[in-house]
Amino acid sequence: MNFLGSFLTPQGVATAAFFMVVGMTIVGALIAVAARNIFHNVLGLVLALIGVAGLFLYLNSPFVALMEILIYVGAICIAICFAIMLSEPMYLPRPPRKLTKILGAAAGAGLIFVFLFLLTKKTTWVPAAQRSTDWSVTTIGHYLLTNYALIFEVVSLLLLVAMLGAIVIARGGRGSS
Amino acid sequence: MDVLTHSLGSEGVRMIVGLIGVIALVSVNALFLIWMERKVAAHMQLRPGPMEVGPHGAIQTVCDAVKLMGKELITPEEVDKPIYYLAPIVVFLPVLLTFLVIPFSQTMVIKDLNVGIILILAFSSLSVLAILMAGWSSKNKYSVFGAIRSVAQNIAYEIPLLITVMSVILMVGSFKLTDIVVAQSRYWFILVQPLAFILYIICATAETNRTPFDLPEAESELVAGFHTEYSGMRFALFFLAEYTNMFIVSAVATVLFLGGWHGPILPGAIWFLLKVYALIFLIMWFRWTFPRVRFDQLVTFAWKILIPLSFVNLLLTALALKIF
């Protein structure tokens, strides 16, 4: 009972929760990259994204965490699954991975990692306790239309590009078959 | 218990008690709803339905549940095992989590989060993923077809659902479910948002895969759709999740449009449950009134009628709020 009591301190629970969500994120990301079955890749991505949502929750941002689940898991991952089911059959043998592809992907990921690392070093971080915890609709709306308007627009541009890309790929497939 | 109260606080104990209550409610609700569905179906077809076990067959579903628990769990040879085993769990967990924020009365809510309505929408979108996992891992063409249909349907109907919910949130200015109910103490929102209510009910019927939108499990063409290869308790979990989902969409409709726990004389929780079961009866009524739609009709209806209408409703709401 004493052992249980010492483990069940708020700090203990918080640390355990933190390592659990970090573990989920990393394991999910590894499955997403390493598995050879494309459906398993997507499920790994889902696990990683839920882990990231857990991190947001840990940082006291429930709104962002739930949006992560709603948009990324609920919409994007499911759209990816849908695309997979409509593409080539999964029972066909898959060719082995090309070394150049792996190296290229590793280089791209490395560059992003360096960029994010430098960014995190430059940013001055405010502890969660000192940040505003006002998550009312009005505040979020104001932020989206003032401080973060540019980011909001850039994201919509990205979606437009993705949509155009999907149309181009789909049309190409229709013409050749 | 002392250690628990000391380390988790009264909040933690409230969570544990709430969770036990939710699990009890989910199982009893499912048993009741299956019996209700059979009775409603029977009476609409001028026959009595189950009558043998208990008064008016009330214990019939309990016997069915015991039978399902005793059944062998068959795992087909070719299935993708980890995903096949995970799918019934993934379908059930988010359903339990959504009960965290549902306000049965002013005080009967486990955790009244600021982002309550988003929590319900986010977690109910996970059930599609479970259907996809079940359908795909079964390695059966009927299952895969059921899963594909389910995804296309859910993507199409989730958009008008979200936009419709947004027009109510615009009126209240809060994602908190209790705030939404409190805002309806003078009049129910169904009076000022009739179009939104109709849109919501249509989308909710589609999201829960009920007839006329039950294409993912259309028994006359797809055997049983995504759960064809499941048996025993695994199949029962899908069933349980489906009926609980029906309860949740009705509860959300009650909160958004029917004034939640508000009502004269009777206590709030009773009013809440009465409204929820009235809506569930409405959804069951649909099943014996409308024939199943064809798939292209289903998707066209969502993209060409429901989504524009929900946007019009949102714009009108915003305009009305600006003017008045």
Image: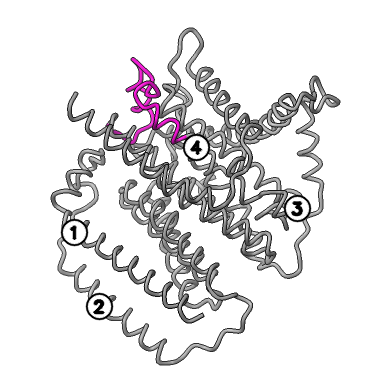
Checking the image for residue A125, the label placed there is 1
Which chain contains the residue that carries disc 4? B
Q: For the residue marked with disc 3, what is the amino acid? A: Ser
Task: Find the distance from the CA under tag 3 to the CA under tag 4.
Answer: 30 Å
Which chain contains the residue that carries disc 1? A
Q: Which residues are magenta?
A: B173-200
Regarding residue B270, the answer to whether it shows in the image is yes
> To which residue does mark 3 refer?
B231
Q: Do dots 2 and 3 share one subunit?
A: no
Residue B52 position in % (x across, y down): 86, 25
Q: Residue at x 62, y 29 (%)?
A: B285
Where is A145 relative to B28, above or below? Answer: below
> To which residue does mark 4 refer?
B202
Residue B219 position in % (x across, y down): 71, 49
Residues at marks 1 and 4 touching, judged by CB atoms closer than 8 Å:
no
Q: Is B182 inside the magenta-drawn segment?
A: yes
Where is A55 relative to B318, above or below? Answer: below
Residue B122 lies left or right of residue B144; in this view the side is: left
Q: Secondary structure at mark 4?
A: helix
Instruction: Check disc 1: other Cα within 10 Å, few if <14, some if 14-19, many if 20+.
Output: few
Residues at marks 1 and 2 touching, judged by CB atoms closer than 8 Å:
no
Q: Do dots 1 and 3 share one subunit?
A: no
Residue B226 position in % (x across, y down): 65, 55
Checking the image for residue A114, the label placed there is 2
Which residue is at the front of the view, B249 or B117? B249
Which residue is at the front of the view, A68 or A127? A68
Task: Find the distance from the CA under tag 1 to the CA under tag 4.
Answer: 46 Å
Instruction: Check disc 4: other Cα within 10 Å, few if <14, some if 14-19, many if 20+.
Output: some
Q: Secondary structure at mark 1?
A: loop
Q: Quadrant of the N terminus of chain A?
A: top right
Instruction: Check disc 3: other Cα within 10 Å, few if <14, some if 14-19, many if 20+.
Output: some
